[in-house]
Amino acid sequence: MSEQIKSQFISALEFRHACKEFDSERKISPSDFDFILQSMRLAPSSFGLEPWQFVVIQDMTLREKIKEHAWGGQNQIPTASHFVVAMHNKGAGLRYDGPLFDEYLFKRRELPPEMEEKYRGFVEQFQENDFDLLQSQRNLDDWAGKQIYIPLAHMLIAAAMLKIDSCPMEGFNRVEVGKLLADELAIDAEVYSPAFLIAFGYRKNQQPNKLRRSLDSLVKWA
């Protein structure tokens, strides 16, 4: 059984590619897309903060507005079955004394006051010294921005397991897309910043074989 699972997993990774155009006539079933979203929900994050928000945009008018600021998604955005904007939390909310830690680390775990104080001090040490996150908002933003790529990987692999194509994209203007979502969907641009776009659907064209470096060139044993 384990060999079969490994084979299925590698096969899914071989199948996955950055799809440049989707078959607009084919739609992902609600059940399959829920599976993809559930894989995102179960992704790990530093200290369990889950510093992200995923916005599924099916309104084609809004997609067209986003497309105006997304040079990297001209074919994917209008043809995708499902289109997602991934947003990460920003700045002060990510601090050891900020709202995310209060809500997701302390309240959710119902830590007693003495444990909360001890843990908060540990996180402060991590942010202040170990990772140098408190020097600027940019440092905190980058920290959250790196974490949001973990649920992205979950979603891409989950889709590939179902033979659903995908394309993560960074080719867009973050500020303009952030303003657009604030205006159209009342998403607080002071709290969230777009990290990347993801299109899901079924490929229109056949894809070439995957090219990757050899394992020996990527891994060093010590």
Image (spheres, rainbow, N blue to C red):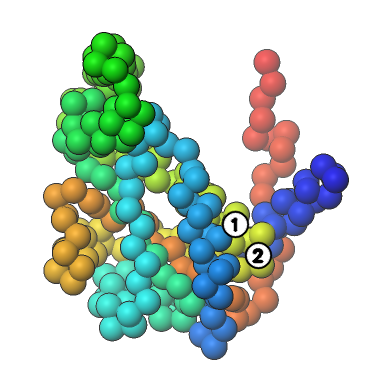
Indicate the position of residue 143 as horizontal and vertical percent values: 32, 35
Indicate the position of residue 212 as horizontal and vertical percent values: 67, 50
Q: Secondary structure at mark 2?
A: loop
Label 2 packing within 10 angstroms: few (<14), some (14-19), many (20+) = few
Residue 99 against residue 76 in the figure, above or below: above
Query: Does residue 139 appear in the picture of this structure?
Result: no
The quadrant where residue 59 appears: bottom left
Determine whether, in the image, residue 97 is placed left or right of residue 86.
left
Residue 130 against residue 60 in the figure, above or below: above
Q: Secondary structure at mark 1?
A: helix
Counting the numbered discs, the total is 2
The quadrant where residue 216 appears: top right
Query: Does residue 177 appear in the picture of this structure?
Result: yes
Closer to the camera in the image, 18 or 110: 110
Indicate the position of residue 222 as horizontal and vertical percent values: 68, 15
Closer to the camera in the image, 163 or 18: 163
- Residue lying at 78% horizontally and 48% vertically, measured from the top left: 5
Q: Are marks 1 and 2 in contact (CB under 8 Å)?
A: yes
Three-letter code, disc 2? Leu
Picture disc at residue 162: 2
| Residue that carries the numbered disc 1 in the rendered image | 158
- Residue lying at 33% horizontally and 33% vertically, measured from the top left: 108
- Residue lying at 45% horizontally and 73% vertically, measured from the top left: 82
Question: Real-space Cα distance between discs 1 and 2?
Answer: 7 Å
Q: Which quadrant, please, contains the N terminus? A: top right
Closer to the camera in the image, 168 or 95: 95
Residue 196 against residue 31 in the figure, above or below: above
